[in-house]
């Protein structure tokens, strides 16, 4: 029986440095590390596996085929947004509010796209 998604993997030239960015800026914790990978865990238990990269990164935009972003759920959008902004996080868009939901897109230091998301009502 499939119970859900456990983690997403991101390939990085320096998995330890990128993991530290997720710890420092998003409050994740390192919960496993090996020579070639670091797992970081969010407060809700979801994990990102950051693995050692091989080769060059292909060009990608917000709507090119494939995985495009990771949504980071927050309960205090304005506070988290201002905290990230004060730490120099690169934002791709301005915050938008629609139907009680708040969202803004940003990147980690390697250009992986994420967005903050605060939903007034969770999806069914």
Image (cartoon, rainbow, N blue to C red):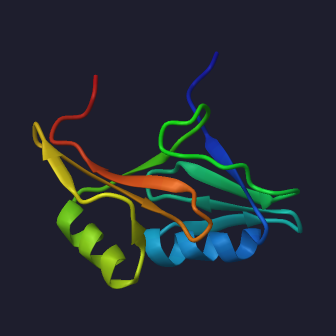
Determine the residue positioned at 57% across, 71% down. 109
- The residue furthest front is 59
Query: Which quadrant: the N terminus?
Result: top right
Viewer-closest of 67 and 24: 67
Number of labelled discs? Answer: 0
Q: Which quadrant would residue 91 be assigned to in this image?
A: bottom left
Determine the residue positioned at 82% across, 59% down. 53
Q: Is residue 1 above or below residue 14?
A: above
Query: Which quadrant: the C terminus?
Result: top left
88 vs 34, left or right, is: left
52 vs 107, left or right, is: right
Q: Which quadrant would residue 80 be assigned to in this image?
A: bottom left
Query: Picture coordinates of residue 69 (x, y %)?
Result: 50, 45
Query: Picture coordinates of residue 49 (x, y %)?
Result: 69, 54
- The residue furthest left is 99
Determine the residue positioned at 44% across, 51% down. 44
53 vs 70, left or right, is: right
Q: Is residue 4 above or below residue 23?
A: above
14 vs 119, left or right, is: right
Query: Picture coordinates of residue 59 (x, y %)?
Result: 66, 49
Viewer-closest of 19 and 64: 64
Query: Picture coordinates of residue 71 (x, y %)?
Result: 42, 47
Q: Is residue 86 above or below residue 117?
A: below
């Amino acid at each position: 029986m499939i119970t859900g998604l456990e983690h997403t993997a991101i390939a990085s030239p320096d998995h330890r440095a990128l993991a530290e960015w997720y710890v420092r800026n998003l409050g994740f914790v390192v919960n496993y590390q090996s020579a070639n990978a670091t797992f970081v865990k969010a407060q809700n238990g979801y994990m990102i596996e950051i693995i050692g990269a091989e080769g060059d990164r292909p060009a990608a935009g917000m709507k090119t085929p494939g995985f495009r972003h990771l949504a980071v759920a927050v309960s205090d959008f304005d506070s988290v947004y201002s905290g990230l902004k004060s730490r120099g996080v690169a934002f791709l868009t301005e915050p938008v509010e629609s139907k009680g939901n708040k969202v803004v897109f940003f990147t980690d230091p390697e250009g992986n796209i994420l967005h903050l998301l605060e939903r007034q009502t969770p999806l069914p």
